[in-house]
Amino acid sequence: MQNRIVQIDKTGIDALKVGTTSIPQPAAHEVVVNIKAVSLNFLDLMIVKGDFPTGLPFPYTPGCDGAGIVTAVGEAVSDWKTGDRVALTYVQNFLAGEGIALKDAVRIGWQTQGVLADYVTVPDYGLVKLPDSLSFEEAATMPVAGVTAWQGLINIANIQPGQTVLVQGTGGVSMFALQIALQAGARVIATTSSDAKAARLKTLGADAVINYKTHPDWQEEVLRLTGGIGADVTLDVGGKDTIRQSLQAVKVNGWVCTAGALTGSEITLDVYGDMNLNFKRLAGLAVGSRESFRDLLKAGIKPVIDKVYPIAEVQAAFRELESGGHFGKLVITL
């Protein structure tokens, strides 16, 4: 039996190829997982295109998010057995607590090779057990996007019933944020680029939706919808082109949690006008811990999946991600 694996030997979506290698064997404290589904993140696209250097050599295997079945365990492993349904944690050694420094973190697909393969090995602490209520496709969407939204809204902003949460766009983090906020009893205002997506957001429970194409100063609409007060918290996924509007859209003592950088990572702020004199709080976060992942699973959130691709169509999946037209997560099955 061979191990199907997606690799690139140079940058670019066209370089993504499906090949084969031998099935890995576990070291003493490792677990082998038969990956059943992988979801795609913007980071995966950036790495494949060469826009986010990892320092890892070619051939490189992408994929930060994976879920599957344990097929082998190392001789020193006691927490797992063959047949266990699991998802991999993204920051492998972030087990609990408030955060972990970049220099100390081990992130799948960044500090290690990714998981777009039939079989991968991970440390025995880098997994969570899945409930039977989640499919592998659903579970694979959660390690990065789901845990990021949970970290920002629950662990940092501590959202409460009756508060207002602003979610931006219809990518994976924002869809999880919408669902987590609604479950917590918050009011949700969403932004999107089209009326068709706006209708879907309302179907999912958004209380109000702003089309940022027709309302480029969307922060003014947020203020109007909140009686001039602003939202309690937003997860900013844009970065360079949206961060100032996000700060203007939240209330006094409101939170802006930086959960992405789709438009660039270098930002310019007026510290006094954008933050200090209006008592705005800006929080950086980079996903969350294994403990937070377990809490998210207990919450029973059902992920929003746009499309599922077979592994043979990996290039098409990445091109769809690049287009930005998806609503929720894109998943590859193996």
Image (spheres, helix red, strand yellow):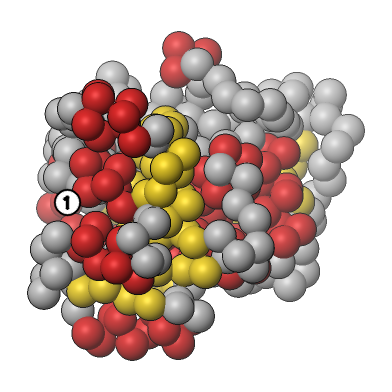
- Write the residue at 77% across / 37% down: 73
Q: Can residue 289 be seen in this view?
A: yes
List the single residue furthest toward the right: 78
The quarter of the displayed image where residue 299 is located = bottom right
Judged left or right of residue 109, residue 125 is right
Image: 101 above or below 231:
above
Which residue in the structure is indicated by mark 1?
13
Q: Quadrant of residue 290?
A: top right
Classify residue 110 as left or right of residue 8. Answer: right
Q: Residue 180 in the image: x percent, y percent? A: 58, 62
Would residue 182 be found to the left or right of residue 221 on screen? right
Nearest the camera: 155 or 53?
155
Q: What residue type is labelled 1?
A: Ile
Q: Residue furthest top?
A: 103
Q: Position of residue 284 (x, y in %)?
A: 42, 31
In this orientation, which residue lies closer to the viewer: 146 or 16?
Answer: 146
Name the side, left or right, on which 42 lies relative to 176.
left
Q: Which of 318 and 263 is in front in this view?
A: 263
Identify the residue shown where x is 25% and y is 24%. Answer: 271
Asked if one can make out residue 141 in the rendered structure from this viewpoint, the answer is no
At horizontal 41% and vertical 48% (from top left) the residue drawn is 251
Q: Where is residue 9 in the image (x, y as percent from the top left)?
A: 20, 36
**Percent position (x, y) of residue 42?**
30, 49
